Amino acid sequence: MNKNQIEKAYQLAKTAYAELGVDTDAVLEQINQVVISLHCWQTDDVGGFETPDATLSGGGIQATGNYPGKASSISEMRQDLEKVLSLLPGSQRLNLHAIYGDFGGELVDRDQIDPKHFQSWIDWCKQQGIGMDFNATCFSHPKAADGFTLSSKNEVNRRFWVEHVKRCRAIAAEVGKQLGTPCIHNTWIPDGSKDTPIDRNGHRTLLKQSLDEAMSIDYPKEYMKDAVESKLFGIGAESMTVGSHDFYLGYAIQNNKLICLDNGHFHPTEQVGDKLSACLQFVDEVLLHLTRPVRWDSDHVVTLNEEVQLIASEVIRNNFLDRVNIGLDFFDASINRIGAYVVGTRAAQKAFLIALLEPTDQLKSLEEKGQLFERLALLEELKTKPFGAIWDYYCLKEGVPVGEDFIKTIQHYETEQLSKRQA
Ligand SMILES: C[C@H](O)[C@H](O)[C@@H](O)C(=O)CO
Ligand SMILES: [Mn+2]
């Protein structure tokens, strides 16, 4: 479609939404408040740059596939992220794991990392005009090989991971201070047990103690905020996860932390969209990890499905944008990784745009009057309103490829850059 056609389609769509009382021009202003934190780890299958051949290992998470072109250095990762950012409308942040530090070829163990190892990332974010979030990396390490980190009964290992998280929080505070926007530091650990354990309580008591120790320093909220991420189970840790949802929700409420809700981390019929208004009665803020679990926490690329739509709709219906921090967490190593980012991030953005185009007051009023057939009918009709024309116009306005045009840009990048990388 050319520019004229996109604009014409937008005008028609604008009229269709206006009939429902929705002002699409206002929506296109509001969508800019939806900031998505781009996880760096889709570029390299969660390997990290601590050693030249680093790969994801240990229980709890897994990347599958070996599509060529993965980033194997900081400069390749930045090049890929810049490509991704150039293909996305709206605003993004960077979400970095501790294993992606700029270690200058030296082996720096995780209990030794400092803000200086992340200065070049801070500078890169400054150049890009974006904020940055951060994560301790409590996996892919010999001291996590037995499946336990912060809840380990091996005191040497437990202390090592406490020190790591402490340092990561200090790095996050420095990031937020320099970038002028709070850095969210998320803690996820793989700790759990393959078979039925006897001492669940012992490990949970240790986890609580470790978190208290690692988070003993308070940083200003303008610099950093802590989030804790629960999980149902992991491969190799099927029978018990120490950091379960009950555990972390309790911890977050008691300690004024953010709860991180990853929609791959719950029983398949549970909905993170439903949890938002429950958690936000008791915690100030939530961190989202949007993903697509296929049968398990498989971390497939996000698509515009009902699960993600409910999450976005609940955020928008309840005016939660300033209390819900939106992150992504998928890593598909079987397809072009830049394509994975662009498809997944755009899908999340589309869900928020659809949510903003909802005549919520009208639906709420039908509900309150008990007109439930009418509520259902309107919800169904909304699904076939000309959302695509609004989305295309948004992309046009933002100066990024419209519709499927980004596919050829990514194919070109693959031919020119990714395919030339060492396997
Ligand atoms: C790499 C991430 O920290 C990780 O995916 C974590 O957030 C998770 O969801 C583990 O299942
Ligand atoms: Mn996650």
Image: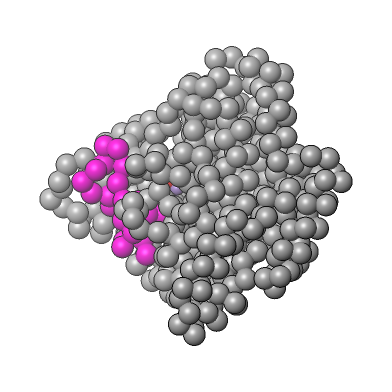
Q: Residue 243 magenta-drawn?
A: yes
What's the residue at 57%, 25% (across, down)?
A: 70
381 left or right of 244 in image: right
- Give the position of the C terminus as an image quadrant: top right
Q: Please tell me in which quadrant of the rendered image residue 148 appears.
A: top left
Q: Position of residue 293 (x, y in %)?
A: 41, 44
315 left or right of 3 in image: left
Residue 172 can be seen, yes or no: no
- Image mark count: 0
Q: Residue 113 magenta-drawn?
A: no
Q: Position of residue 360 (x, y in %)?
A: 59, 72
289 left or right of 141 in image: right
> Which residue is at the front of the view, 308 or 80?
308
Magenta extent: 223-249
Residue 360 can be seen, yes or no: yes
What's the residue at 37%, 47% (across, down)?
A: 189
What's the residue at 58%, 27% (across, down)?
A: 336
What's the residue at 74%, 58% (across, down)?
A: 13
> Which residue is at the front of the view, 187 or 378?
378
Residue at the right extreme, as displayed:
4
Colouring used for the render = one colour
Q: Is residue 155 above or below residue 106?
A: below
Q: Position of residue 361 (x, y in %)?
A: 60, 77
- Give the position of the N terminus as an image quadrant: top right
Residue at the bottom extreme, as displayed:
369
Q: Position of residue 253 (x, y in %)?
A: 40, 70
